[in-house]
């Protein structure tokens, strides 16, 4: 056999991009159905708070309350789309539709499958964060041109929480057990990460723990970008933003090997 005629396997990047494109095409089929709740939920929250709680609270951390909570809602869009996509979505693709069995029967391996998924989930986080920020700008709560970078924070947020969703999909025995993931992991992370109030208002020990939670620095950076008020936390938050999601991703992808290849 002529060695020059032997076909080379696609590169890692090529296979990851193929998985990304596969999810993109599938998502297109139900784009509006899947997108509407993800964007609508934080906007309903903003409207409810803007008409009710904000008028009672007044200011928070030196800014009006609506301005304080608005950037967190952009991150919530990224959190919800990624956490549900990589928990329930992964479960269905793995246990019901057996999509992964078909994928790994090709030259694509487990690493490529799940890195492709996480990067696609990050893309959705970027898109939904962008939509929320654009809509919020009509409420007068965006005070800095730096807000154009918020969707990129949404990308990294989605990769991080998509990784947590993969961990959940790795551990559950049946689909009902995802209730523990949503109620016991996602909800506390949202409530204690500076979404509704500064974590400095918590007791000192709880405040320190809150600043170690995965979501805290994503919201912190998002708030800096929308307000233009940059603090010393930026020097911790940016490296955290760029590194931690991919550490979580690497661990999550590794954990899926035993689940998928049995």
Image: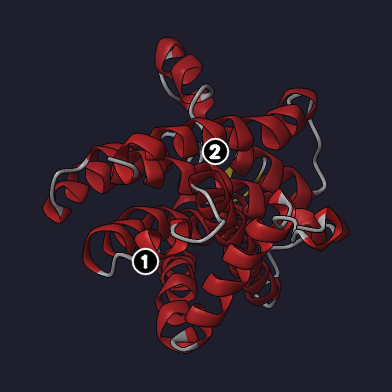
Name the residue that disc number 2 marks: 249
**Front one among 204 and 88:** 88
The residue sitting at 15% across, 46% down in the picture is 177
Characterize the local packing of mark 1: few (<14), some (14-19) or many (20 or more) Cα atoms within 10 angstroms.
few
Which of 136/28 is in front? 28
Residue 151 tag number: none
The residue singled out by tag 1 in the image is 99
Q: Secondary structure at mark 2?
A: helix
Q: Position of residue 240 (x, y in %)?
A: 68, 29
Going by the picture, which residue comes out furthest to the top?
205
In the rendered image, residue 256, in percent from the top left (x then y), is placed at 39, 40
Taking the image as shown, residue 183 lies to the left or right of residue 194, namely left
Residue at 56% from the left image edge and 56% from the top image edge: 107
The answer to whether residue 52 shows anywhere in this view is yes
Quadrant of the rendered image containing residue 217: top right
Q: Secondary structure at mark 1?
A: helix
């Amino acid at each position: 056999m002529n060695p020059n005629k032997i076909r080379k396997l696609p590169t890692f990047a090529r296979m990851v991009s193929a998985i990304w494109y596969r999810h993109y095409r599938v998502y297109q089929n139900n784009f509006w159905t899947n997108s509407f709740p993800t964007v609508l939920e934080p906007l309903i929250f903003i409207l409810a708070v803007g008409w009710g709680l904000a008028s009672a609270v007044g200011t928070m951390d030196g800014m009006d309350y609506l301005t304080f909570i608005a950037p967190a809602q952009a991150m919530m869009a990224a959190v919800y789309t990624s956490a549900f996509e990589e928990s329930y979505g992964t479960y269905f693709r793995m246990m019901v539709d057996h999509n992964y069995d078909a994928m790994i029967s090709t030259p694509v391996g487990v690493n490529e499958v799940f890195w492709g998924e996480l990067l696609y989930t990050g893309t959705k986080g970027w898109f939904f964060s962008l939509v929320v920020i654009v809509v919020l700008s009509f409420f007068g709560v965006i005070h800095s041109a730096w807000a154009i970078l918020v969707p990129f924070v949404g990308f990294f947020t989605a990769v991080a929480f998509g990784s947590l969703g993969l961990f959940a999909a790795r551990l559950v025995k049946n689909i009902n057990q995802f209730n523990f993931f949503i109620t016991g992991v996602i909800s506390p992370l949202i409530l204690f990460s500076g979404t509704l109030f500064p974590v400095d208002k918590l007791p000192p020990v709880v405040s320190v723990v809150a600043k170690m939670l995965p979501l805290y620095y994503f919201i912190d950076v998002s708030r800096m970008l929308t307000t233009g008020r940059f603090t010393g936390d930026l020097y911790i938050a940016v490296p955290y933003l760029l590194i931690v999601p991919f550490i979580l991703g690497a661990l999550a992808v590794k954990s899926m090997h035993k689940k998928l290849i049995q």
